[in-house]
């Protein structure tokens, strides 16, 4: 069964810290992997998309890496800010074409000022 | 990126009534759209796959007669929650992509059944 797991489930850090969110997936034959941000009661904001042939993607203070062979991805957030507080979701697409993303349960991040 | 618009963003309805949620791809055609449901502090769970011009495919445990999906055009899919009950209160969100590329999500609909 294709599953996505995120650790930790929740994380609280002081402002300014660098932090790493982890995502692991069964079945390394993925098509792509996406990281999303979700604010309470809101929809999803796509942060980074990594294709299966890529090792990492960067956007501002965010860096996502992908290690297919070990079934892992990490989201690195540099110099965290209170505005980064949200739930971060990792989602995997295993097949090209019209197939759905499979989501992890998310990591709930709180950045304390 | 592509835009997926979902409406309404929130709705409150009485138990026993039906609610329709619309999902539109604004600047691309989507032969397939997906409907997810998210309960509080849970992740998104796929409910069904909506296929343009054909019947939707439902995930195990999702009642197709209760959650009616219609994908009448390449830019519009609708989810109707029929005879809604309080346990159907949830966050419903749709997504679409262009053939396996980046997935784009609607804003989501918060349904509260009272």
Image: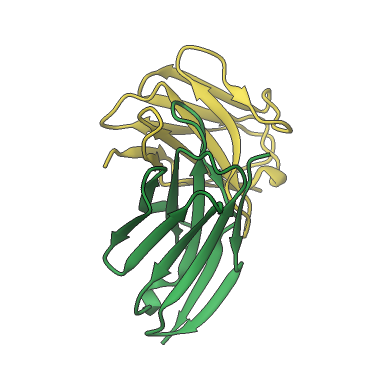
Regarding residue A81, the answer to whether it shows in the image is: yes
Q: Position of residue B26 (x, y in %)?
A: 29, 32
Q: Position of residue B76 (x, y in %)?
A: 39, 25
Regarding residue B112, the answer to whether it shows in the image is: no
Colour that chain B carries in the picture: yellow
Q: Which residue is drawn at the image coordinates 53% and 35% (left, top)?
A: B35
Q: Position of residue A40 (x, y in %)?
A: 49, 62
Taking the image as shown, residue A40 lies to the left or right of residue B102, namely right
Q: Which residue is drawn at the image coordinates 38% and 53% (left, top)?
A: A55
Depth check: A104 or A85 in front?
A104
Q: Quadrant of residue A9?
A: bottom right
Depth check: B61 or B91 in front?
B61
* Quadrant location of the C terminus of chain A in the rendered image: bottom left
> Is the residue B58 above or below the residue A103 in the image?
above
Q: Which residue is drawn at the image coordinates 53% and 80% (left, top)?
A: A12
| Chain assigned green | A
Taking the image as shown, residue B34 lies to the left or right of residue A113, namely right
Q: Quadrant of residue B29?
A: top left
> Is the residue B55 above or below the residue B7 in the image?
above
* Quadrant location of the N terminus of chain A in the rendered image: top right
Taking the image as shown, residue A41 lies to the left or right of residue B86, namely left
Q: Position of residue A102 (x, y in %)?
A: 56, 43
């Amino acid at each position: 069964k294709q599953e996505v797991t995120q650790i930790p489930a929740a994380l609280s850090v002081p402002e300014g810290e660098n932090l790493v969110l982890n995502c692991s997936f069964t079945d390394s034959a993925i098509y792509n992997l996406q990281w999303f941000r979700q604010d309470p009661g809101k929809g999803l904001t796509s942060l980074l998309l990594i294709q299966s042939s890529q090792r990492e993607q960067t956007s501002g203070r965010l860096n996502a890496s992908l290690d297919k062979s070990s079934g892992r991805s990490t989201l690195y957030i540099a110099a965290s800010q209170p505005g980064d507080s949200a739930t971060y979701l990792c989602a995997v697409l295993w097949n090209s074409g019209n197939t759905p993303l499979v989501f992890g349960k998310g990591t709930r991040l709180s950045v304390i000022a | 990126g592509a835009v997926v618009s979902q409406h309404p963003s929130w709705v409150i309805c009485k138990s026993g009534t039906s609610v329709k949620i619309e999902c539109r791809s604004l600047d691309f055609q989507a032969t397939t759209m997906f409907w997810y449901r998210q309960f509080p502090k849970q992740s998104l769970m796929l409910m069904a796959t909506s296929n343009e011009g054909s019947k939707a495919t439902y995930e195990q445990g999702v009642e197709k007669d209760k959650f009616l999906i219609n994908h009448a055009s390449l830019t519009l899919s609708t989810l109707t929650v029929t005879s809604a009950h309080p346990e159907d209160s949830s966050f419903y969100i749709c997504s679409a992509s262009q053939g396996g590329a980046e997935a784009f999500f609607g804003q989501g609909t918060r349904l509260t059944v009272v």
